[in-house]
Structure formats: structure tokens, C-alpha cells
Image (cartoon, grey):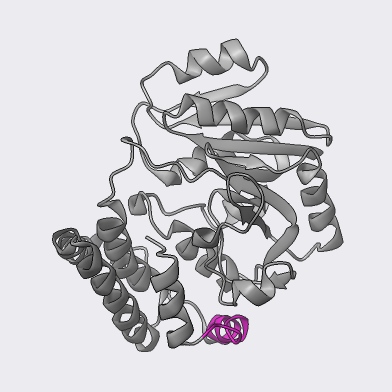
Amino acid sequence: MNQDLVSVAILSYKREGALANTLASVQMQSYKPCEIIVVDNGSEDGIEDFVHRSFPGVRVVPLPKNIGTVARNRGVEQASGSIVVMLDNDVSFDSAFELQRIVNAFSRQPEADCIVFKVMNATGETLHVRDWCHPRSYLRFQDAEFETPYITEGACAFRREAFLRIDGYYEPLFIGHEGWDLALRLLDQGGRIVYNPAVRVRHAALRDSTRSNLRPYYYYTRNYIWIAARNYPLGSAVPFLLKYMGMMAYFSVRVGHLAAFGRGIRDGLAGLPTVWRTRKPFSKATGRTLRNLSRERPGLIAAWRRHRERPQI
């Protein structure tokens, strides 16, 4: 393992133009040495040839089918660096110095296992509020460094050893809050997650035919059930599910996708026997850590106003 090498693993599904922008932003980084890995999530549209032709030196890991965002695991498995940066193919670095800032952050905070970035809009002018899920007000804390229980999945960096120690993303989740599941297990092993606003990326947040607008209402609902079953003590699982099932029901009714919400509940319950076999509820100490990290969480009225003004899904 090369301790100086940083690996950048980009999860890609179609979107050739967006991937090109992301790769260009990585190749312009001042920090060296850096290896670049593209995990092609079963695109079947010539992405591998495009990358080899346009970005020689970039390694492509082709997957035979789309296995969802947990395909990031394949990028980490293939990486050689002690630090692995994870980007989605519509997320690009804001400047040529972001990798150096990531390395500096890990060096300055040897106890941190994960650094999460400040996610800006496509032009880099303002915070991309849809990506802010930290339990603090973005209006007050977007430019402050703090510990967080939240991982922005396509805009973060891990110590590779720590990521592999907790077995990476839970693959049956496919997509939706896989970062929350990972964060709970990381925190339960004494790991730390730090939001660092000095590291900035731009999120194009593309909407296209490759992504269904029904997806969040089904997958988020189903995955909340599985995350509760895998990670939460029974006394904490009930209020967690009441809160988030109620939230998803509200969102689903608001946009007319109640059927997708219902399918999420159905499949979430049907999958419980399999998920339950992986159950490892977090400790009381981790529960205290979660409460401490969430002390600055805005109240329900503030959260409702935010969702009214800027819908999150």
C-alpha cells in the first residue's frame, strides 16, 4: 500500500459528458501521486472505450450489470492508495487544489476515518442544499468544520483500511441512504466522520432518462426499514421508523407517488428475514455519540419549512 498515493474512484452510469467533466477536474489536481479509477456500472454504451480513448491512464472497472451505488465498493477494492476519494460522475472538483486539501485534512486529523466535502451547485456559486443532510442548519454551519454522523456518498474520502474494516456499503440497499448505514457501522467501531468545508466539489445534479423519478419513494422507504433492522436497538428503531416512514408518506402523497411508497414498505418487510441475519445493533455508547452529534439539529418546523422551500426529493 502506497501511503502517499491517493486513489479517486468515480462511480459512473452512462452520462459520458458529465463523466468527462469529472475526469478533467481530477486530472487537473496539483497533488501527486494520484490514481483514477472509473467503476462503470453496467452502462453498455461504450463508456469504457471512451475513457481509454479520451483519458489514457485512467483505469476502468467494468461491471456486467448495474448494481447500484454500492458499486463504490468495487472501486475501493481496486484502489492502491491509503486514501480513497469517492465521486459520482456528475460531481467534479471545484479547483485544482482539492486533493491536496483532502490529504491535509487527514494529516491534521489522524483520528478521522472519513472526510465529507462541501457540495456546491453546478457553477460553484452556492451550496447545493439538496445534498445537505447534516444535523445542523446549513445557514449557520456550511462553512464550519464539525463532526457529523452523515456521509455524502458521492462526495467524500475514506481511509481505505477503515472502509474495508466495516465491509463497505451494504450491497442489497442498491441506492438510497447507504451512507447512513455505513456511517452507523463506522461510528459503532469508534470511527469519526468530519465535514470539511475547505474541500469543495460541484454537483451538476443531472435529471435524465437514466434515473426514474419514482426511485426515492420506493428505495428510501424500503431502505429505512432495512437500516433500522440492521443497525438500531429495538427501543430506537421504533421512533426512527415512525419519523421516517411518516416523512416518506408525506413526500409521496405530495407528489402523487404513494404506490411507490407502498411497494417500498411491502418489499422492505419481505426482505427482513435476509436483512435480520446481518443485524448488529449499535451500542449505547454509539447512541450517545449520535445524540451528541445531533444536538444542533433544526427543529421540526425549521425542517418542514426547508422541505417546503427546497424539496429534498
Q: What percent of the width, then of the height, locates residue 92? A: 63, 40
Of 30 and 111, nearer the camera is 30
Q: Residue at x 67, y 27 (%)?
A: 24
Q: Is residue 96 magenta?
A: no
Asked whether residue 198 appears in the rendered view, the answer is yes
Question: Most prominent secondary structure in the magenta stretch?
Answer: helix
Q: Residue at x 58, y 65 (%)?
A: 186
Of 86 and 172, nearer the camera is 86
Question: Extreme top residue here?
Answer: 53
Q: What percent of the width, then of the height, locates residue 251? A: 28, 68
Of 42 and 45, nearer the camera is 45
Q: In which quarter of the image is residue 258?
A: bottom left
- Span highlighted in magenta in the image: 285-298
Q: In which quarter of the image is the C terminus?
A: bottom left
The answer to whether residue 34 is left or right of residue 59 is: right
Residue 120 sits above or below residue 230 on the image: above
Q: What percent of the width, then of the height, locates residue 72? A: 51, 42
Q: Residue at x 63, y 73 (%)?
A: 139
Q: Residue at x 44, y 46 (%)?
A: 70
Q: What percent of the width, then of the height, locates residue 87? A: 58, 42
